[in-house]
Image (cartoon, coloured by chain):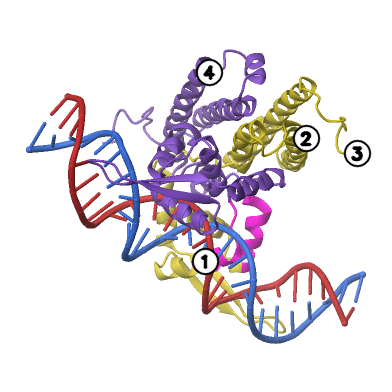
Chain colours: A purple, B yellow, C red, D blue
Amino acid sequence: MALSHAMLSLLMDKPQSGYDLAKNFSESISFFWKATHQQIYRELAKLEEQNLVTVETIEQDGRPDKKLYSITEAGKTFLAAWLLQPGEVMPIKEDLLVKLWASDLASGSSLMDSHKTITALRQEFHRHRQLHAEKLATYEQIEQKYYQNAAQASCGQQPYRYLVLRRGIRYEQDYIAWCDEVLTQLELELSSEPLSEPLSNDSESKPV
Amino acid sequence: MALSHAMLSLLMDKPQSGYDLAKNFSESISFFWKATHQQIYRELAKLEEQNLVTVETIEQDGRPDKKLYSITEAGKTFLAAWLLQPGEVMPIKEDLLVKLWASDLASGSSLMDSHKTITALRQEFHRHRQLHAEKLATYEQIEQKYYQNAAQASCGQQPYRYLVLRRGIRYEQDYIAWCDEVLTQLELELSSEPLSEPLSNDSESKPV
DNA sequence: GCCTACATGTAAACCGTTACATGATTAT
DNA sequence: ATAATCATGTAACGGTTTACATGTAGGC
């Protein structure tokens, strides 16, 4: 599990509170790792038990006390050891793929007519295509802002983070291209479909 | 959560035991959804409570009794309703990306010299590249075996499953291409690295 | 003799999400 | 007034993983 490691990485930068970590998570790492404040507070308590971080309570006027967490030497060693260890390939886990897979069975049986299945899938894939396009746009903006070109990025101070961003960009581009493949096929299915209903093209005219 | 839906989909095909489902999971759906026998047995118990499946205990000689589960009409309706509902975009969650992200901090500090970091990353990316290449090869074999060409697949009885397989193929191809991007950059870093150590190219000669 | 396949389960630990709870400050 | 931001937490539930547990049959 990499949550604790991601947190320790963030603490390498500078000491932070649980609140800070949660914010940084959602601002910078969120596209490849997510964590709620809950997970973070619980994990921090565990890391403290293991002496991988230390706490310092800071009183503030007006607002609640802040608990500043710092990574210890043991924490740094722990993180470095993890970096050298081999990891596993992560499975995909996509609801959409389960749906697509199940659609073959559903449209074959009396559950649904294939027209209904196709129009539902088409809508869903349009939606997902757009959501991924939005993510892609965000990542490309970051790329242009912080890394004007790849050569500069590799010579810069954060050569590896640029490669992480590249993964995000590639992933979204590929996902969008796949959505287009699917949508093209769905159009084909629609056009070769046996016409049994009074044919409403999308769902603009309701059957009476 | 789609585990129950994936299980119901498998049961649409034919009645099966928990053991059968676990096997089918690892044989056919495993690249986009995984489940241990544990999860399956528990989920089957829940589905039975909700009357989405029924059980029939079959006595066998020599081996333990088999519990054959079948999907009910209510189960089919439940599945069909799910297919029409919109779903969320899944987050990525990749250990490797966390590692890459953390490597910037590690090689900048006194934790590790950058040479050590680079060679460790290079090995890890070689490994992952190969694992993904193996998966890709498996998927491409399936593609050739069952779907000689896309046109045939779309007119066949399982047009949507072919699109699922396409996702797997695209995903692995893209992942491999990204690994190559990373490996190219790592070579660049290696060559532009200030030489402080007696330079052992990979780790063939140990420092004395 | 040992491992794999068949077949099912319990128990516990751990990870993840959502809701509830508190309480001051600042901006609209 | 109302909402958002700062800041921390408890409680409960649900999903996932790993270990433990049992017992037969067949292949190496």
Task: Please state the horizontal and vertical placement of residue B199, each as a whole percent of the image.
Answer: 86, 30
Q: Is residue A207 magenta?
A: no
Task: Please state the horizontal and vertical placement of residue B71, each as a whole percent of the image.
Answer: 49, 63
Q: Chain of mark 1?
A: B
- In the picture, the disc for residue A146 is 4
Crowding at mark 2 (Cα within 10 Å: few <14, some 14-19, many 20+): some
Which quarter of the figure has residue A113? top left
- In the picture, the disc for residue B70 is 1
Distance of label 3 from label 2 (alpha carbons):
12 Å
Q: Chain of mark 2?
A: B
Q: Chain of mark 3?
A: B
- Magenta stretch secondary structure, dominant: helix
Residue that label 3 marks = B204
Query: Are discs 4 and 2 both within one chain?
Result: no
Distance of label 3 from label 1 (alpha carbons):
58 Å
Distance of label 4 from label 3 (alpha carbons):
37 Å
Residue that label 2 marks = B119
